[in-house]
Structures are given as structure tokens and as C-alpha cells.
Amino acid sequence: MRIYYQITTQDPVIVSQSNATTNNHNTCDFIPGSAILGALAAKLYPELADQQDTSWAIFHSGAVQFSPCYPLVGDEVALPIPASWHIEKGRPIFEHAKLNQQTVNIPSVLYAREETQYKQLRSGFITSNGDEAQVKMGQVTKTAINNESGTVELGQLYSYSYIEQGQTFVGWIETPASYQSLIEDALCKVTRIGRAKNTEFGRVTVTPITGKVAHPQALRSQLVLWCMADCEFLDEFGNSCLSPSGNMIDPLLDGITLNIDQSYIRSHTMARFNQKRQSFDSQSQVISKGSVLVFELNGHTPTQATLNKIVTSGLGINKQFGQGWVMVNPSWYQTKQLNMSSLYSPLLVEPVKPKKLVDDHMLAESTLLKWVTEQQAAEQSKASAKEAALELLQVVAKAYESARGFNSLGKHLQVGPTLTQWNRIGELVKADIGDWKAQAFEGEHCICKAKNDEFGWGIEWQGDTGYTNFADTMSAVLAHHSTAVMRLFLEQLCQYDPSTFDGLKRFKAYLSTQSQGGN
């Protein structure tokens, strides 16, 4: 029995990649199954104090599996990008939130390796039709407090990265039918997960939903396993194994062999904290999510029942933490060129629509609720303006980069509008002049004038639709945006001078941190 649920972050959520005490805690860009297991254990352990056999079966035996929670895009769960996917160096991985059409599955194009240099896609999530699933991240710096004096503890500064609030993820729990109602009831009671739950982090809403997964298809000569989560295997001596044999996948598959040349296996080391012993367990090596294992069948023909068992039961050990989840024989592996409209059989769910807390007439009558609604609208407007400003900054950075590269100008030369010229536009916007767009882009005496400014507003490069320059590009991009967006845009842009080589470099570094959710 598989229970699907969606989890929405009401506050930022911190789920560290490592439990080690370090200055900077790197956070997962998904919610691990171990976090859900721990949250349910906190709810059920007191209720099962007299039923230790039941608590052991649910949380320790592996009979109940807690999958990782991945981002929800529409009605589809986005999955980790396969490690065998590569793209030519220098090309962007995504274009307009869609996977680049030039992305290839390397085993199908081995012949081209000598002609083209590829880079591996090592992170991120993608849907079955090639849409990018962006998980918004943030970072905060804190300091420890001395409990006796109530003052800041000297030398105790640390940083957290976190998953921002307002995002929805989907996971599932594989459980025997006898535990289904118990787990569903406890699942709805989960309100906080992750670290720092006693401060402003960790508040979530968990809601059971319905979902379905397609049955795998058999291939003639190979068995392809795409790791949806980390997988951990042990050899006959009890040591970690990163190249599993056929009988580690299923006893009926003894005799199939791992094709090292066509497999793409990434790994990492982990050590879980044992609450009972108050110490870390021994380190173990696991195959990272996104890895692709290709087995040669050597004449064996797996039955449909065996393939279904691999999908539902998973592989390896520690499946109660969400490890061992794989997809069998994904359709993207069977074609030389990736089909962006059908990369794999999607994991479809029916998302829950948020319920109204009060009726519309009550909302209109309540002054407090009216104020709350206005504040929420203001926050949404501010977030939209910030996102629009970031998109404008990225367009400006690309324009500077294109102009400098196309004209092959040296590092010592200024290329494009200078900081002083941007500040002139900023003065118009700050003064809230109604016709600032006309003064900036229209007429003989406008600020953004290509004439007589060969290396500034008038510098040209080859764009997607032909030759263009800064004046024409910025006029088309900036003219339709509101004053609020322009103020945010110019406030951030005018901290740099991208017309210089070093200024552009710092500007691009800043945009990179913003795109990754940094502050």
C-alpha cells in the first residue's frame, strides 16, 4: 500500500546534508525521507509505548519505506536529472525553464565523444516533458546566545541555508495495509520538520493525496535502473558496494552483469547519528540519486513481476530512510536523441487545493482579516517585483557579455553604458517622473541614445533576430516595466559598473548567488 502526500513549507525549512557541526550547514534541495520518518516517530512513539513490536516494524525494520519528497510541478512530481545526461560545454542546461534540446544521453552517442566535449548534468530536477523544477533556497547567518548572560556568545557565528517557504513537495510511504490508517492519521499531525524548529524554521502542512506510477517495460538485452534516491548495497563481507551485482538487485537476476562503461555512478559518504547511543554510526558509501545503472542481461529475461517488485520494493538496505527508489527502463534511455515531450513515465498526483479558512462575507466584515489580506497582497507584489528585477538584471548581464565578446574588446576597455549613465536613469525613476521612459529612450536628447556613443549605448552585437545595440535592447526590455520593478532593478545594478571587465565579473557573480537563492 503506497500513501502519497504533499508537503507545503509554511516557514523556511532547514534539512542539512550532514549532521556534522560546521560553520556553514548546506541544506538539501529536497526533503529527505528520514526527515518525515523522524517527524512521524515523534508523533507515534508515545502512542506506541506499549507496542514496541509495532514501532520497530514501522520505523526500523524496513517494512515501511519513506521516500524523499521532490518538487511538485503542476500535477507531476519532478525527478532527479540522470547522471548520464550531458550537454556540450558552453551551452546552458536550461533555456526558458526548458531542458536544452542539445542534451544527450552519453551511452547513445559514445561515437561523438572525440569530436565534442561534454559536461555532465549533476544536479537539479526535471519533469517528463523537460520542464525545470526550481527549488528556491535562501541563507541566514546567526550567532549563539549565552544562556547565563543572555548575550551573544563570542566566536559562535554560523550560517544556515534553507528551503524557502511557500513551496510544495510530494513524497510517498510504502506500508503494509495493517499500518495504513495509523500512519495516515499521524501524517496529518506533522507540523514541523528539519532543524531549528524552536525558532522561525520548520513549519509545514502535510496533506494525503492520490498518485499513480506506470509499470516498467522490459528491454531485450539490458536492464536500466535510474536512481530516484540514494541506494546503498553491501557485499558478502558487509562492506559498502558501489558496483552491485545482479543478485543484489533481485535473487532471480543472478547472472546479469553491470556494464561499467555505460553506467554513470556518482557516490557520497554518509554517517547517520544514532540517537540511542548519542553518537554517529560508522561511515558508509552510497550511490547518489540520479545515478544510472546499466546491466547486461546475458540471456536472462526478467519477468514483469520482477520488474514491478523492483519498482515497489526498491533496492539495497536502509529503505526505511527512502533509499533504494529506482525507475526501471526509462523511455529516455531507449532513444539516441532525447524526446523532450516524453522523457519518462511521469509520477502523476492530484494536488490538494487550499481550503478557504473563512467565508468571503466574513472576510469582508473583519478588519483584521482585511489587513492580513492586504499585507499578503503586498508581499506577493513585492516578490513579483523582485523576480522581475532579477530577470532584467540577467538580460543586462547577457547584453554586456554579448557586446564584449562579439566585438573582441580588451579587458582594459569599457563596453556598453557606464555606471554614470545608469545613474541618470535611476534619478528619473527615483524622482517618480511620469514620462521617465520618454526622457530615457525617445527624442534627440534622450539618455539612451545610440548616436555618437559607439562603445556605449550604440555598441552592436549579433542577437537572436539580427544586429542590435544597447539602446534598442534596453528600450524593448525596460519600457513596459513598472516604477517599482525599475527601482529594484536600478538599485541593484548601480552597485556595479558592468561596462568594465572586472565590474561585469562581479556583477555576474552576484547574479549567480541570487539565482541559487543566496542573499
Image (tube, helix red, strand yellow):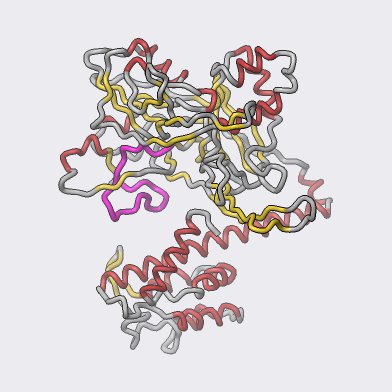
The image quadrant where one finds the N terminus is top right
420 shown above or below 70 = below
Quadrant hosting residue 464: bottom left
Q: What x and y, as percent, mark residue 180?
A: 63, 17
Q: What x and y, as percent, mark residue 495?
A: 51, 74
Q: 163 or 146, which lies in front?
A: 146
The image quadrant where one finds the C terminus is bottom right
Q: What x and y, as percent, mark residue 93?
A: 35, 49
At x 70%, y 48%, the residue is 200
Q: Is residue 44 left or right of residue 255?
A: right
Q: 149 or 47, which lies in front?
A: 149
Q: Is residue 83 magenta?
A: yes
At x 47%, y 83%, the residue is 420
121 shown above or below 90 = above
The residues colored magenta run: 80-101
Quadrant hosting residue 209: top right
At x 79%, y 51%, the residue is 148
Q: What x and y, as percent, mark residue 319?
A: 50, 23
471 shown above or below 488 = below
Q: Is residue 281 magenta?
A: no
Q: 154 or 241, which lies in front?
A: 154
What count of labels does the image hold? 0
Q: Is residue 327 left or right of residue 140?
A: left
Q: 443 or 283, which lies in front?
A: 283
At x 67%, y 56%, the residue is 377
